Image (cartoon, rainbow, N blue to C red):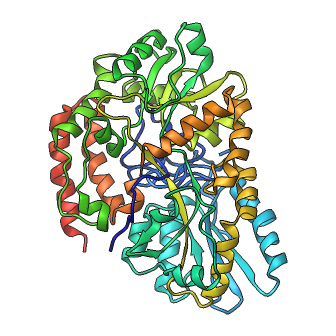
Amino acid sequence: MTLLSGSTRATRRDLLKGAGALTLGIASISLLAACGGGAAPAPTSAAATPAPQGATGAAPAATPTPQPQAAAATPAAQGNPPSGKKGEVSWLVRTGPVENKWEKEVAIPAFQKANPDIKINLIIVPWDQFDPKLFTLFAGGTPVDVWSHWGRSGFADYVHKGMVADLTPHINSSNYDLSGFAPGVVDIYKVNGKYMGMPLLTTFGTPLFYNANLFQQANIDPPPVDWKSPWSWEQFVEAGKKLTKDYGTPTGTYGISYTQNIQQLAYLGGGDAFLPEHYQTGLAKTTKLDSPEVLAGVEAVYNLIYKDKVSPTPQLSSALSSGNVDPFRAQKLAITVDGGWQYWNYKPQIHDFKWAVGADPKLQTNKNVTYTDPWMLSSKSADPESAWKFIAYLVSEEGQTAYITATGTPPTRTKLIDKWLDDFTGPTGMSKEQLQKVTSGALENGVESVNHLFVGYDEISKAIDQVMGDVWAGKKTPKEGLAAAKAQVDVVLASIK
């Protein structure tokens, strides 16, 4: 099974819950992430699939994606079980006020008006209940028809379990035009030449978000928007030092938070934590977690905390995040290198300062993780033709226009990117040309999140996080942690069949 056909560059999420717990713990506060469990559009997280939240809503991630914002009580599942009848399409989605409003008031009415003979049965479940609900319905013989990877599992898990239908016959029979999608995004979910998913959103990678007001006060020039001419790591650290004040106190200002997603840290050090066969088939029996390149990337971010003292320790992170406050939005943090779901998190929530976006700094490389979420069709659907019609609408120009308008998530259709860029010039204070350069550069320099593409990534990420948590807390050296993580992950990989 080839999970990636052609380029692995693309688009998707770092609310990575397992592999990407952020230095400041911001992942747990994020409102959105492309994948994982979030309330609105959140993409998929980095280690265990993030749990982002809805774009312009109140409320984090998809694959490894952060967790949704804490609520007083866990929301209950909504909707009726699938009937298995012709003419009815069951659509399983995550809980999130922004997305759910769009689903109920825009997407379903528009589709059913054009297709009055098809009824859409919307089933809404919280992120932590998403996979249990999905698997239970499949096991019970009444599977849902359409869903995305918005629980702890990723696309590769569903394909590996035989749950996902090949869309190629539907694409061919309906003469569906794929040329309108951004280069590469449709091929991300192509398996052995077969299209197994259609892209609904991307995150424009894992860029550098910064507080422009704090930069101005510190008399620091903004980071470059050109990924081919980025800050060096030394320039990045120097800026962090100038932006850090009263280090060690919960009332201080901290210069930098850099994602701890092991995939991106490996790229930072000039290598990869995983083997080529992992990218080709989703399965491998070992890793390169203990390689010198991965160590170099981990040490660079570790040093931001313990040597350079521009990033807070986990203990300080907890204090800064007290009360579910995002330190970046509270202006306690000047720079955060985080998943692109922050575009649609920050736009509706930050009004008292200007925030902007730059290219990631370069150590050995500045290759970044991207997050793209697909709609999938059940291999057991009782009415695959109707389900395909619904998916085709959701990723159509009309369907995506409504979605990005409601949520703020970046589109996967090339024609709609201009509209998205126009919508973000005001909030960021950047020109359309600057935004276009930083977003397109992130995709050109990006690799799809492995939490979407590796079988069993939830267990892989848990094994990594179990050990690496001690590294970020200063209890183990990076070398000790990576050696232990490799040993544990190799055991997990050996158990995956």
What residue sits 42% from the left and 22% below the top? 231
Number of numbered labels in the structure image: 0
The correct choice, above or below, for 248 with respect to 346 in the image is: above
Q: Is residue 90 left or right of residue 242?
A: right
Q: The N terminus is located in which quarter?
A: bottom left
Nearer to me, 98 or 34: 34
**In the rendering, at what x and y percent does residue 283 appear?**
27, 66
What residue sits 68% from the left and 79% below the top? 389
Q: Is residue 18 left or right of residue 486?
A: right
Residue 40 in sight from this viewpoint: no
Q: In the figure, residue 238 lies in which quadrant?
A: top left
Nearer to me, 335 or 478: 335
**In the rendering, at what x and y percent does residue 101 appear?**
76, 59
Residue 337 in sight from this viewpoint: yes
> In the orientation shown, which residue stands out farthest toward the front?
179
> In the orientation shown, which residue stands out farthest toward the right?
113
Q: The C terminus is located in which quarter?
A: bottom left
